[in-house]
Image: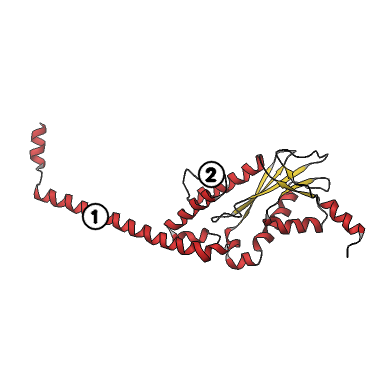
Amino acid sequence: MKTEKEKDDDESCQSTQIINTNNPSEWKGRTIEIDDAGTGDLVGDAFIGFRDTETRKIIFQAVPVGLYNEGNRDDDSPKKHIVKVVKKALRELNHSKGDRILLCRGDCFDLVREYFNKNNIYHEPAIIEGVLQNAVEGRYIQHLRKLGITSRNLTEESGAQRYFISFSWVCRDFPNRERFVKTGFPSWEKKWRKIAIKRYMKFQRNISHEEDSIRRRANQIYELMLENPISIRESNSKDQ
C-alpha cells in the first residue's frame, strides 16, 4: 500500500496532462522532446529522435531491425534497447533535474516511462508534432531509401500506404529482402509472409515470361538477317 509521500513522489515525476508540442504549456526550464519513427513499420530499423527546444539540437538513435525478430521481440529487446538509447541521448543533451521531457505516448516507450518514474525524472505524455516529428520520420525515410526503396510515393506520413510500399519492395526480391523485415510482428508469420512468397513467385514467372519474349524476338530478328543478308560493300557504294 502506498503512503501519501510515495503517491506525491510519483506525481512529481509524471504529469497526467497530455501536451501537444504545437501548443505546449509554459515551462520555466528547458524542454526535451522524444519521439519515434518506424517502430510500427514493417521494414528497416526504427529511430528515436530527441530535440532540445532551447538549442534546437536534434539527435537520432537507431533501433536495429534485428531486435524485432521473433525471439528478441518476445523478450522486449526493442523496448530495452530504447531505454539504453534514451539514457545515452539524455547524457549527450546534458539533461538535468530542472528539465521537462515531453515523451511520445507510444507503447515502445513503456520501459522508458518505468525508468523515468523509478528515477524521479520529470516527464509529460505528449503528442509530438512539428519539428521533431518531421525530422525523425524524415530520418526513417532516408534509411528506407538507402535500403533501396525508391518509390516516389514513399513519404514521411506513416500508415497503410507506406506499409504496402515497403511490403511490395520486399515481395520483389523476397529471399534477399526478408532480412530487412521486422519478422517478430505476429501478422508477418500469420499472414503477410505467405502473401509475400506468392507475390515473389508471381514476379519471377513474369520476369521469366518477359525474358522468353525478348529471346524469341531476338531469334526472329537474327533469322531475318540470315535470310536477307545486307552487303556491306553494296551499302557503302550506295552511300558514295
CB-based contact (under 8 Å), mark 1 and mark 2: no
Residue at image point 55% right, 47% down: 141
Q: For this view, does 167 lie left or right of residue 134? A: left
In the rendered image, residue 150, in percent from the top left (x then y), is placed at 46, 46
Q: Residue furthest top?
A: 240
Q: For this view, does 194 lie left or right of residue 38? A: left
**Quick one: 91 or 52, which is closer to the camera?**
52
Residue at image point 91% right, 61% down: 3
* Number of residues whose C-alpha sits closer than 10 Å to that of mark 1, classed few (under 14), some (14–19) or many (20 or more): few
Find the distance from the CA under tag 1 to the CA under tag 2.
38 Å
> Residue 99, can we see it?
yes
**Quick one: 189 or 85, which is closer to the camera?**
189
Quadrant the N terminus occupies: bottom right
Q: Which residue is mark 1?
A: 215
- Residue type for callout 1: Arg
Under circle 2, the secondary element is: loop
**Quick one: 1 or 46, which is closer to the camera?**
1
Quadrant the C terminus occupies: top left
Closer mark to the observer between disc 1 and disc 2: 2
> Residue 175, can we see it?
no
Q: Which residue is mark 2?
A: 155
Residue at image point 58% right, 55% down: 45
Q: What label sits on residue 173 in the rendered view? A: none
Under circle 1, the secondary element is: helix
Q: For this view, does 223 lie left or right of residue 89? A: left
In the rendered image, residue 172, in percent from the top left (x then y), is placed at 42, 56
- Residue type for callout 2: Thr
In this figure, what is the number of numbered marks? 2
* Number of residues whose C-alpha sits closer than 10 Å to that of mark 2, classed few (under 14), some (14–19) or many (20 or more): some
In the rendered image, residue 31, in percent from the top left (x then y), is placed at 76, 42
